[in-house]
Image: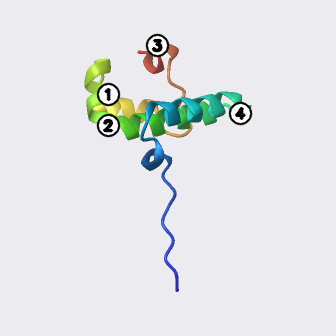
């Protein structure tokens, strides 16, 4: 039996060009959570700990703000 692994977009976000294309595609989607998921994938690809430190947030706070179904404030995402 073949074992399947869960797809993780962050594994493929390995350059600024790919990240920009991914983010643009997310912005084109009408789903309200698609952009938030894309931001989370990008944050994971870049390293949550480093990104949280640069943004002045705790790592756990960043994970919580970018979790599916979260409704982060604009200034949290745009930090």
> Which element type, helix, strand or loop, lies under badge 1?
helix
Q: Please say whether residue 15 is visible from this viewpoint.
A: yes
Q: Residues within 10 Å of mark 1 (few under 14, many from 20)?
A: some
Side of 69 relative to 44 (left or right) = right
Q: Residues within 10 Å of mark 2 (few under 14, many from 20)?
A: few
Q: Residues within 10 Å of mark 3 (few under 14, many from 20)?
A: few
Mark 3, residue position? 75
Q: Residue at horizontal 44%, vertical 30%? A: 65
Side of 32 relative to 5 (left or right) = right
Are dots 1 and 4 in contact, CB under 8 Å? Answer: no
Mark 1, residue position? 51
> Which element type, helix, strand or loop, lies under badge 4?
loop
Q: Residues within 10 Å of mark 4 (few under 14, many from 20)?
A: few
> Which element type, helix, strand or loop, lies under badge 2?
loop
Are dots 2 and 1 in contact, CB under 8 Å? Answer: yes
Q: Residue at horizontal 50%, vertical 47%? A: 9
Q: In the rendering, which numbered label is found on residue 29?
A: 4
Mark 2, residue position? 47
Figure quadrant of residue 60 = top left
What is the quadrant of the C terminus in the image? Answer: top left
């Amino acid at each position: 039996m073949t074992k399947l692994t869960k797809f993780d977009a962050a594994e493929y976000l390995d350059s600024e060009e790919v990240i920009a294309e991914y983010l643009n595609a997310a912005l084109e989607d009408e789903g309200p959570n698609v952009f938030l998921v894309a931001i989370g994938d990008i944050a994971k690809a870049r390293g949550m700990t480093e990104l949280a430190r640069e943004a002045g947030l705790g790592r756990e706070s960043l994970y919580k703000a970018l979790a599916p179904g979260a409704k982060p404030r604009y200034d949290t995402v745009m930090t």
